[in-house]
Amino acid sequence: MNQRFIVGSVAFIALCAGIVGALYIAPPSDGPVASPQYFQSYPEPRAVEPFSLTDNKGNPFNKKRLFGQWSLVFVGYTFCPDICPTTMAELNGIYPQLKAIGGTNPIRVVFVSIDPNRDSVERLDEYVSYFNSDFLAVTGEHKELFPFVRNLGMMYAIAESTDNPNYLVDHSASVVLVDPQARVIGRFKPKREPGKLSISDPQEILADMPIIISK
């Protein structure tokens, strides 16, 4: 057999083997795509239905204002004795790092008061500004609030008669994420541990947000 033919055949086989190895054996150059470790995605993104609320500056807050940014939404009320102020303080603690993530669409925190009877616009402004002046607080009538909160995948209920000035309001403690297309995509759910407040872990939010935004 012609020696040149044999050498050429060996070279061709080696080339083919190299191509196969590059395609099927060598790992992708960009590495595996990371997935959020703590974020609980909803099975499908859920479009936010039209709503009409008021923010802590007295301006209308509606679906249009959800577009173009990532919204970390938390439901509560200013008279809440524990979960609400703790969650707001924790979100404030990681907010500089959240803003530093970058990307086309900024991240903001939206506090939804489900206690319009006591939470006036002025009180909401004072409350949210105490934690961070960049945070937004919104509220409205229950006929607007209830379907909006339910649309987010959360709930609330006034636990006792409002004749008692110190009445409590039961509410979800998760932090829900709305994407720049005004779609609810999932939540950061609190861990329930004996002797501890059930609040969303800020470090888990901080760990997963860059991954979620990059997708």
Image (cartoon, rainbow, N blue to C red):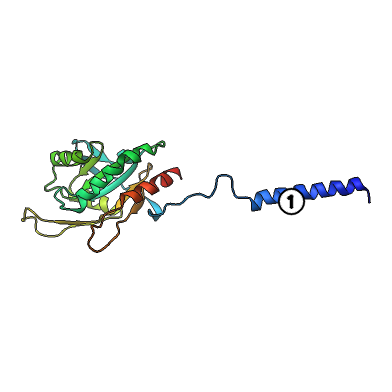
Residue extending furthest toward the bottom: 194
Q: Is residue 188 left or right of residue 195?
A: right
Q: What residue did someone put label 1 on? A: 17
Q: Is residue 187 left or right of residue 32?
A: left
Residue at image position (90%, 45%) is: 4
Residue 76: image location, x then y, percent: 21, 50
Q: Nearer the viewer, residue 90 or 66?
A: 90
Secondary structure of the residue carrying tag 1 is helix
| Vertical comparison of 143 with 66: above or below | below
Residue 5: image location, x then y, percent: 89, 47
Please tell me in which quadrant of the rendered image residue 50 appears: top left
Residue 120: image location, x then y, percent: 13, 42
Residue 28: image location, x then y, percent: 59, 48
Crowdedness near tag 1: few (<14), some (14–19) or many (≥20) residues, C-alpha within 10 Å: few
Q: Nearer the viewer, residue 168 or 12?
A: 12
Please tell me in which quadrant of the rendered image residue 67 appears: top left
Q: Is residue 76 left or right of residue 99?
A: left
Q: Is residue 160 left or right of residue 155?
A: left
